[in-house]
Image (spheres, grey):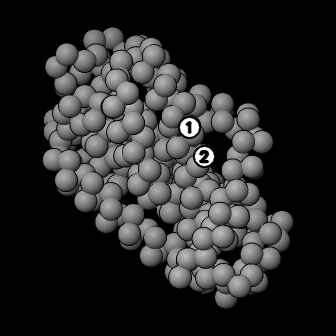
Amino acid sequence: MLNLNAVYALLLREAKIFFREKERIISILISPLLFLFVMGKGIAGGHSPVAGYSYQQFIFPGIMAMVILFTSITYGLYIIWDKRLDFLKEVLAAPISRTTLFVGKSLGGMLGSITETLLLLLIGAAFILPLDIFKILLTLAAAFPISFMITNIGLTIGARMKSMEGFGLVMSFLTWPLFFFSGALFDLSTSAPYIKVLSLFDPVTYAVDLFRVIMLGQGNFPVWISLGAILVFSLATTILGVVSFGKLQQEK
């Protein structure tokens, strides 16, 4: 069972760490903003598959998913830091379940991801794609399960890694394929057959599509398929994460 007091304590610790690192908040937004304002505007004749929207506006939902992907999955690095600082050892010795520990850490990772998402969303709504308050709130609501899903992946990897170098290597081989095969920068319906097939196994694909439906009113999948896929991936990554944290307990 979940110990809500322990979950709150873990979440509070992660919130304090995140908001103390103000340079981290800014640096994470640099790459997405370059994609939006350089690639989005710089590609000559960039075509938008959605009528009535520019190419820059078309990729905006994909860049939103990119922020969640990179912010959430990078959070797994902090598990390795906790190991080195022996904080994790102290938490593992506490009378709380591994599920409580995992959920608390996952919510902590989500906090940073949602904060970054909100900042980019406000920038985009002001300068790229005008959105009413309903679409902004709906986009934020969709960001929560997506962030949870990706954070779980980062935590699972972090729990199995023993060095930050190893984590960085795995991240490099994982995050960019997840991003590029998601169709964040192009229309999947007109892409090569092998890309279409691989995209179906990419959880970020459904995040991008759900954001496009909310912001642009058009996607490649019905909303219920995207939501269902995100929920399935969330459940699967939660199970993998709890199992990984259980093994982490045995190692300690």
Identify residue type, mark 2: Gly
Quadrant where the C terminus lies? bottom right
Name the disc covering residue 97, or none.
none
The image shows residue 241, relative to residue 144, as above or below, that is: below
Q: Secondary structure at mark 1?
A: helix
- Tell me: 161 left or right of 205: right
Identify residue type, mark 1: Glu
Please give the name of the residue rendered at 33% of the width and 31% of the height, measured from the top-left corner. Answer: 135
Residue with the mark numbered 1: 116
Near-viewer residue (115 or 6): 6
Q: Is residue 251 among the parts visible in the rendering?
A: no
Q: How many marks?
A: 2
Please give the name of the residue rendered at 40% of the width and 17% of the height, measured from the top-left corner. Answer: 128
The image shows residue 101, relative to residue 107, as above or below, that is: below
Name the disc covering residue 112, or none.
2
Please give the name of the residue rendered at 28% of the width and 43% of the height, measured from the top-left corner. Answer: 210
Q: Secondary structure at mark 2?
A: helix
**What whole-number distance in Å separates the C-alpha atoms at marks 2 and 1?**
6 Å
- Discs 2, 1 touching: Cβ within 8 Å: yes
Please give the name of the residue rendered at 56% of the width and 68% of the height, measured from the top-left corner. Answer: 103
The image shows residue 101, relative to residue 16, as above or below, that is: below
Q: Is residue 220 among the parts visible in the rendering?
A: yes
Residue 149, by quadrant, is: bottom left
Q: State the image coordinates of residue 63 (x, y, percent, origin top left).
A: 42, 33
Q: State the image coordinates of residue 134 (x, y, percent, origin top left).
A: 33, 31
